[in-house]
Image: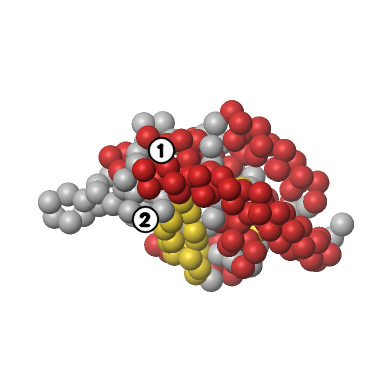
């Protein structure tokens, strides 16, 4: 199936699957919010500017896994210090990603594609790496099932571009199966020695 044809099918599948997922996961989402409230969270969701298709910036939604704790200068503490026990659980189970199904329905994202990254990373990409923005970003992707946060940024970008150049129905189906296995095994949650992953820095 040519990508031009598969692109239409992919969008239909994205909306159908995301809608069904939200319907079935809403009770889970409500339960998580109740637990977050009992654990002292004042807000339950956060949005962050991310770069999407054709480098268009959009708001990505997630459940909060970190507190807003700051130091005496009003600066946010490190990820490790702000990541709560509940937050670690949400990340290990990928439950913090549930709100992104709404991003998929809105059309900001696809179920499968390169993960949408921070706006400040844009100037750091090579010409080849910018190809990752030639398709919609995804909740999961080829890089996520081949290491997630346990691999380097360079390795992630190589995998992202490879996916863009080889996108197909069979590849997407394979990624879905591998994603389920990764989530069940809770692999690649963080980079070695980090709460999540070191920020991209190519200065």
Q: Position of residue 163 (x, y in %)?
A: 68, 50
Q: Residue 100: horizontal and vertical position, in percent?
A: 56, 56
Q: Is residue 144 visible?
A: yes
Residue 8 position within the rendered picture, expressed as x and y whole percent measured from the top left: 79, 66
The label on residue 86 is 1
Quarter of the C terminus within the rendering: bottom left
**25 sits to left or right of 85:** right
Visible residue check, residue 162: no
Residue shown at 21%/54% (left/top)? 75
Residue drawn at the location 47% of the way across and 40% of the way down: 90
Please, which residue is most extreme toward the top here? Answer: 185
C-alpha distance separating marks 1 and 2: 14 Å
**Helix, strand or loop for disc 2:** loop
Q: Could you say which disc has been placed on residue 145 in the image?
A: none
Q: How is the image coloured?
A: secondary structure
Q: Identify which residue is drawn at 42% across, 42% down.
A: 35
Dot 1, how many residues are within 10 Å of its Cα: few (below 14), some (14-19), or many (20+)? some
- Whether tag 1 and tag 2 are in contact, CB under 8 A, the answer is no
Q: Is residue 151 left or right of residue 8?
A: left
Earlier-in-chain disc, 1 versus 2: 2
Q: Position of residue 186 (x, y in %)?
A: 55, 31
140 is higher (above) or lower (below) than 120: above
Q: Which residue is mark 2?
A: 43
Closer to us: 89 or 186: 89
């Amino acid at each position: 199936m040519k990508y031009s044809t598969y692109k239409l099918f992919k969008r239909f599948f994205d909306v159908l699957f995301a809608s069904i997922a939200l319907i079935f996961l809403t009770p889970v989402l409500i339960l998580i919010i109740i637990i977050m409230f009992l654990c002292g969270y004042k807000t339950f969701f956060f949005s962050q500017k991310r770069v999407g298709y054709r480098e268009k910036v959009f708001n990505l939604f997630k459940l909060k896994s970190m507190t807003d704790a700051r130091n005496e200068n009003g600066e946010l503490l490190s990820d490790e210090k702000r990541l709560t026990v509940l937050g670690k659980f949400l990340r290990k189970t990928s439950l913090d990603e549930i709100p992104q199904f709404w991003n998929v329905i809105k059309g900001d994202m696809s179920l499968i594609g390169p993960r949408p990254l921070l706006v400040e990373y844009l100037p750091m990409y090579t010409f080849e790496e910018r190809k990752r923005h030639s398709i919609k970003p995804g909740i999961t992707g080829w890089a996520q099932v081949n290491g997630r946060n346990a691999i380097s940024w360079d390795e992630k970008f190589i995998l992202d571009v490879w996916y863009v150049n080889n996108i197909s129905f069979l590849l997407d189906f394979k990624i879905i199966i591998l994603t389920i296995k990764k989530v069940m095994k809770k692999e690649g949650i963080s980079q070695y020695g980090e709460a999540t992953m070191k920020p991209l820095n190519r200065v």
